[in-house]
Image (cartoon, coloured by chain):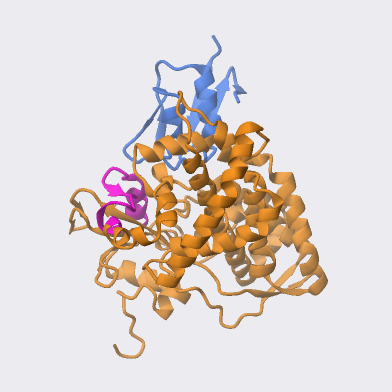
Amino acid sequence: MPRVRVTVDHDRCAGVTMCTQLAPGAFAINGDGQSEFQAGRWELADLAEAADGCPMSAIAVLADDVEVT
Amino acid sequence: MGPGSVDLDDLLSDEAVNHPRAFYARLRDTDPVYWNQRWNGWVLTGYDDVADGFRNHRTLSSDRFAGPFGEELSAVSSDYQQLFGFLSKFFVWKDQPYHTRVRSLVNKAFTPRSVEVLRPRVRQLVAELIEPLRAAGEADFLARFAFTLPVVVIGEYLGVPARGRDRLRQWAQDLGAVIFVSGNDDDRMRKGEEAMGELADFLRPVIRDRRAEPRDDLLSGMVQAQDRGDFLSEDEVIANAILMVFAGHETTMNLLANGIVAFAEFPEQWASLRDDPSLAPGATEEILRYDGPIRAMARWAREPMRLRGHDIAAGDRLLLVQYAANHDPARFADPGRVDITRWPNKHTTFGQGIHTCLGAPLARLEAQEAFGALAAQFSHLEIAEDPLRYVPNIVSRSLRGLHVTFADQ
């Protein structure tokens, strides 16, 4: 299993919620309307979809320090 | 009213239309949640309230076919069946779950990565549009550049046949007049009805062709788009294509024109961009903030809510004034100054939350390419309109014309 690191840049996130649809369970919208990565169960392919589908380019997914796209 | 006084209820006053920063600051200072008697709704001008308003899609509805907006429309909708038949399928004017269903099906085509493939073509179009400006040294930038670029880009991206592109401009204008202007003026609605009918008749056979023989364009993409067995109906594809034409047209046009005005006002920022083309993305964000193409978006309250001491009743209308939020000194330091290196620059021009502008990545790309190439080509911009006049409109920030002198020294 690769070591996966996910970041959501809150200077960019607009709370569009595409990530919560593309990677169910991996992201949640906090009280400020910002997406946050959730520890737990997710598929790496879904995370990549979420990063790719984010209209604000706010999500980065790194597997073993290499950006997943 | 005495001389020098300003009617805060008049969203179309000279100050509101031509000097929005002053007008919205006055409103914000009076009450950031202001009851506007004439508009018959609440006008929100503080950053946090506007941003929260956009995110609160459960309480604040975008549905134009229900609530107070629906009542207005239902009075005229039977006279304009084409128009309202398709407008009612615009996902921007819907709430969940319909909104989210359609948005999910079209989102992929407008992600930053997806639109990036258009950059070389946009760059080429920009170069072609700059050439006559350079040759003449003076032009109406609005008509000769800003109007043309977005409509060509979205027309090509959609896959609208070339023979329809000139008509596309007229249709986009006629529909924009219905969509961006409040009130139901007969002549405008009739033109909108005609434009909608013609556009639908024009698109329907094209969409059927794409279903039979898909190409590498957005119409084919929408015909083929599937999400867990769900797909768009033919009328939904038409509605979305029409939405993209008008939404991708007027707004981007105004962004480009307003940017030229802002850079003429802050020549040292133009010089910075000219010196360092990598600043084009930041420059674009700052123009979106400082003088974005959208002033405000309307919502209505599905449930009562309390905001800054005011009781907002179910069925009340709210105007979320993005232009005011973008100039709120509580959020942006020195908001009246253009700074293309400003970061973070979380303006509200594309909205926030689930309705955040679908075309934002494409608008950004077009503006980055246009501002970058224009700065590289012309060291000096001089605005030849005095005074600048804007279209009286609550929703859009739209110049009537923009004659500019371009020079390179």
Report which quarter residue B273 is drawn in.
Answer: bottom right
Report which quarter residue B189 is drawn in.
Answer: bottom left
- The relative height of residue B133 versus residue B101 in the rendered view (above or below) is below
- The relative height of residue B206 versus residue B11 in the rendered view (above or below) is above
Residue A63, image x, y percentages: 57, 19
Please state which of residues B147 and A17 is positioned toward the viewer in this rendering: B147
Magenta span contains residue B363:
no
Residue B335 seen in render: no
Q: Residue at x 29, y 49 (%)?
A: B60
Chain letter, colour blue in render? A
Q: Is residue B276 left or right of residue A17?
A: right
Chain letter, colour orange in render? B
Residue B84, image x, y percentages: 40, 54
Residues shaded magenta? B46-70
Residue B350, image x, y percentages: 47, 51
Please state which of residues B322 and B300 is positioned toward the viewer in this rendering: B300
Q: Quadrant of the N terminus of chain B?
A: bottom left
Q: Name the residue at the bottom extreme.
A: B3
